[in-house]
Amino acid sequence: MPVHNTEIAEMLSRLAELLEIQGANPFRIRAYRKAAQTIEGLPHSVTSMLADGSDLSALPGIGEDLAAKIQEIVKTGHLSLLDQVSSQLPGQLAELAKIPTLGPKRVKILYDTLGIKDLKSLAKAARAGKIRELHGFGPKTEEKILAETDKRSGTEQRIKISTAEEFAEPILDYLKNAKGVKDAIVAGSYRRRKDTIGDLDILVTCTQAKTLMNHFVAYEEVETIVSKGHTRATVLLRSGLQVDLRVVPEESYGAALQYFTGSKAHNIAVRSLAVKKGLKINEYGVFRGETRLAGRTEKEVYAQVGLPYVEPELRENWGEVEAGLHHALPHLVTLNEIRGDLHVHSKASDGHFSIEEMALAAQGKGYNYLAICDHSQHVTIAHGLDANRLAKQIEEIDQLNGTLKGFTILKGAEVDILEDGSLDLCDDLLQRLDLTVCAIHYKFNLPRAKQTERIIRAMDHPSFSILAHPTGRMINEREPYEIDMEQIMAAALERGCCLEVNAQPVRLDLNDRHCKMAKDMGVKVVISTDAHRTTDLDFMRFGVGQARRGWLEPEDVLNTLRLKELKKLLRRASS
Ligand code: DGT
Ligand code: CA
Ligand code: CA
């Protein structure tokens, strides 16, 4: 493939940029820049000039050394010095220099003064107002940088786990259809059920690796083949999602699954256990010297380092390794143990199905109960219920319950927490409900102390049962509002209130860390789907995923209880 002049010029000016970040001799830097300009301005292609035997060093600004470098580019398509220099630069400095507002000089300053070496740390510093303080930057520049980082992080945004499922499941099916495939599984953050996913890491055991590689890259959604070897390939789908595929031998399947499930932090902790025992652990197995001790299953891999099997959701190095060594790993809650959904909507507010339809769907899932929690009046856009309409709904539910067998519809409401912390329904109606899910839907930007106080004041109300979607975050859409979660949990514990793990994939609120915090503080949670249609009831699995990531066991989750026990706990005031 002939190398174009613009490509040569691009490599040379790139080299100049990187050298500038490194603080190289300014004359050298200028020489590369000038050469780039010269090449760009040539009337003939350098490739053809060389083919004709022209002497490049005769060109203005190009000496022996540069002529050799250009020849290297034309011959190999690479410039080894450029590769070398970019590998010497930490993080993404080379990429940062491409940001128009920055350029090499500024990147160097940012790195030297604030240690900024990637997009993430750049955005963080800009948000914290640290960049404006630097000599030669100022608030305007900071603003521009922030706009740039926002734009860029937008293109490489992490996707919601639900979106990841939509892509992953069909690819798995497609791969399983290929000849010779035995196991096919998505490892990585997907298997750990993280709320967002960076890319998909698929592992396959297969007797015909070569055919499988061709099959994989021929997948109809593949837009770019980033790399393709005998046992591994990376592609980008049309959506921009990256998918890594690795074919592993069966005797290494467990070791590879363990390795590629991660997290990296967990792997590092596990590896240090192995090292203490004089073992080597990698994606091929656990070894003593050349002898493979384990590798076929994850269980035997863990056993070799002295650990019981660790559930993927726990593998974050949040204490699971220590707990495993002490036989103190939690028995995580499972989807099967969920007996009902305590936050769903009906047509009466912003849902799309009748109470009866929602109830039948829940019963069809094997649940014993379902709480209808339509919005209270304050949420006018959601057609919130006023006292009259709610009273009617209570009657309707009583009637329906008379017709259902082995299933109970609970009378609830999603009650707005008003700005002063009072509840958006009158006390006599609140008292007629089985439970309330209380939530903030406006005034998101109160100062942290005020917002915290608002919620705790609401909890003071004897009819407050569950704090719904406690932080209000919407993944990739809205930041959480400012609250002191520890204080809120302490207040909930004191008052016998509990917190919701909202299972809507865009919310997942409480998140995993907050679930762990609830566990550590002894606060009970409920996992609810906030379903607006019958199919939304299936969101439960995402909420359970976060609960499991937060170490929650069935006894920490109220909706694993039978109705009788549940009702006892919900009615804190009258008990
Ligand atoms: P993501 O894709 O950002 O949502 O997160 P992960 O956890 O899926 O990370 P990814 O795709 O970069 O790598 C998949 C797994 O491979 C990761 O969880 C652990 C393992 N892994 C990757 N790089 C390293 C490494 O440098 N050291 C170790 N010990 N493990 C690694
Ligand atoms: Ca991944
Ligand atoms: Ca990956």
Image (cartoon, helix red, strand yellow):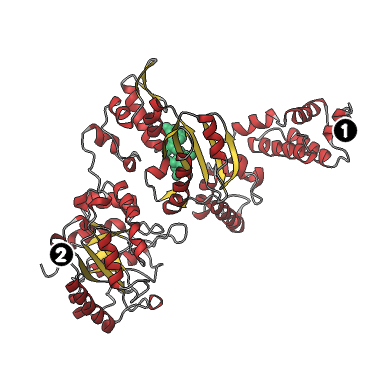
Which residue has dot 2 on it? 567
The answer to whether residue 314 is left or right of residue 135 is left
Say which of 138 and 95 sits in front.
Answer: 95
List x then y, in percent, for residue 392.
25, 82
Q: Which mark is residue 59?
A: 1
**Camera sees residue 108:** no
At x 25%, y 48%, the residue is 333
At x 32%, y 46%, the residue is 549
Type of amino acid under label 2: Lys
Say which of 24 and 467 sits in front.
Answer: 467
Mark 1 within 8 Å of ligand 3, using the beta carbon: no
Instruction: Indicate the quadrant where residue 219 lies.
Output: top right
Instruction: Indicate the quadrant where residue 329 lies.
Output: top left
The answer to whether residue 133 is left or right of residue 6 is left
Q: Which of marks 1 and 2 is in front?
A: 2
**Camera sees residue 340:** yes
List x then y, in percent, for residue 89.
59, 34
At x 41%, y 25%, the residue is 284
Asked if 130 appears above or below 200 in the picture, the reply is below
Give the SS element for disc 2: helix
Asked if 48 appears above or below 286 in the picture, the reply is below
Give the SS element for disc 1: loop
Type of amino acid under label 1: Leu
Instruction: Indicate the quadrant where residue 88 lies.
Output: top right
Question: Quadrant location of the N terminus?
Answer: top right
